[in-house]
Amino acid sequence: MKKMLKDTLQFLMMIVISLGVALLLRLFAVDFYSIPSDSMSPAIEPGDFIMVNKLSFGARMYRNFDFLENGSEPETWRVKGFSPIHHGDVVVFNFPYARSWNKINMHLSKFYVKRCIGIPGDTLRIREGFYEINGKRGFGNLRDQEMIGHFKGTFPPGIFHTIPFDFRMGWNIRNMGPLYIPRKGDVVRLDSVSIRLYQKMMEYENRTKGKVQTDGTNSYTFRTNWYFMAGDRMWNSQDSRYIGLIPEEFIVGKATRILYSKDRETGEFYWDRFLKRIR
């Protein structure tokens, strides 16, 4: 009887330890997400189950969990990672609008996977459908960019116009920018154009609505790094062209591999996608 009880306790302890190790791995090292849409096709398809490396950019941790009770913006810090975010990295991040489209805040249960097109310090344009970073092309899905640039028909409603949705600027998916992507410590002069572009971002950093703290010289110093994320299937992707730049705190990690893939309707596995590297 004693031996049976001892064996049972050891078995339960192994289960608890295993669960604890799995939880720590998901918090600090790796996480997994199922892909519901085709916005990253052909790199990632609906039905793919992907692995996200949190160690690459550094695991994101919460300073406290007060936000679960009072609905405030989570305060985070990041463990030092192995590398910064590069152009072309496929990244998972929290959707930046949890309650309304008027204010940037972290949606805790909604995650997007997109390709990083612009990093802090870049100047981004879309010219004739093509992304240009600091005057150079070659970023993102060039095939879709060419299709948009040469499309002669009528764009579906809600597709053509982009941030800041100000018709005086006339930005759209064919011609947009220039848009400077701020990095932490950058000082931006506040004028009628920069206020239109950065208002929500400044309000997010100051945790305010309508009022922004400046240095008293009609300029603003950014407090975080921002990124431009875009889907590979540009005809069907809700990305930074529409939702704006993404703050570094919202980034979860780098999508590295497709663990497995199956048809969402039939359940049939796509064996050629097992353990496929995401590029």
Image: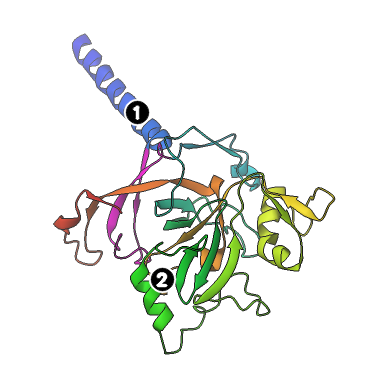
Instruction: Tell me, for residue 278, which label it has, or none.
Output: none
Instruction: Tell me, for residue 234, which label it has, or none.
Output: 2
| Magenta stretch: includes residue 31 | yes
Please name the amino acid that badge 1 sits on. Val
* Residue that extends furthest to the top in the rendered view of this protein: 2
Circle 2 Cα neighbour tier, 10 Å, few/some/many (<14 / 14–19 / ≥20):
many
Q: Secondary structure at mark 1?
A: helix
Q: Quarter-wise, where is residue 166 in the image?
A: bottom right
Answer with left or right where residue 46 lies relative to residue 112: left
Q: Which residue is mark 1?
A: 21
* Residue that extends furthest to the right in the rendered view of this protein: 216
Where residue 155 sits: x, y (%)?
A: 46, 84
Residue displayed at 47% across by 77% down: 128
Q: Which residues are magenta?
A: 30-56
Please name the amino acid that badge 2 sits on. Met
Residue displayed at 61% across by 65% down: 101
| Magenta stretch: includes residue 137 | no
Q: Quarter-wise, where is residue 1 in the image?
A: top left
Query: Visible in this render: residue 239?
Result: no
Front position among marks 1 and 2 = 2
Answer with left or right where residue 15 lies relative to residue 248: left
